[in-house]
Image (tube, rainbow, N blue to C red):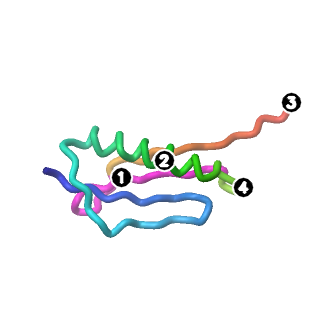
Amino acid sequence: MPKFYFQLFDRDGAGTTETAYDFESIEAAKAEARRVLAEMATEGLPAAPLNMMSVELFDESRKPLAEIRLILEEIPK
């Protein structure tokens, strides 16, 4: 089964997991990245100055595969 790594970027900055996670496919790993991002958002929405949080997905050789982002945008009226 392929191994994947995640890098989390939240209000506290970036953090890399050193643990490899096994998933059946890249699509399954992306689904888990989305779930993790949603869980991060329950702990607090993104804040200024970036107004963004993300989960970046890497393969077992640490090659970047995808980044799932949540961006909070304020639109003045």
Q: Where is residue 66 in the image (x, y as percent from the top left)?
A: 37, 47
Distance between the Cα atoms at labels 1 and 2? 12 Å
Q: Is residue 19 above or below residue 3?
A: below
Label 2: how many residues lie within 10 Å, few (<14), some (14-19) or many (20+)? many
Q: Main secondary structure of the magenta part?
A: strand
Pointer 4 with pointer 1, Cβ within 8 A: no
Label 4: how many residues lie within 10 Å, few (<14), some (14-19) or many (20+)? few
Q: How many marks?
A: 4
Residue found at the far right of this picture: 77
Rendered residue at 34%/42% (across/down): 30
Distance between the Cα atoms at labels 3 and 1? 36 Å
Q: Where is residue 64 in the image (x, y as percent from the top left)?
A: 34, 55
Q: Is residue 50 left or right of residue 21?
A: right
Residue on which disc 4 sits:
48
Q: Position of residue 73 (x, y in %)?
A: 70, 40
Label 1: how many residues lie within 10 Å, few (<14), some (14-19) or many (20+)? many
Label 3: how many residues lie within 10 Å, few (<14), some (14-19) or many (20+)? few
Distance between the Cα atoms at labels 4 and 1? 24 Å
Labelled disc at residue 37:
2
Counting residues from the start of the chain, the first of labels 2 and 3 encountered is 2
Tag 3's secondary structure? loop
Residue on which disc 3 sits:
77
| Callout in the foreground (4, 2) | 2
Counting residues from the start of the chain, the first of labels 4 and 1 encountered is 4
Query: In the image, which residues are magenta?
Result: 51-64
Counting residues from the start of the chain, the first of labels 3 and 4 encountered is 4
Residue on which disc 1 sits:
57
Amino acid under disc 1: Leu
Rendered residue at 86%/30% (across/down): 77
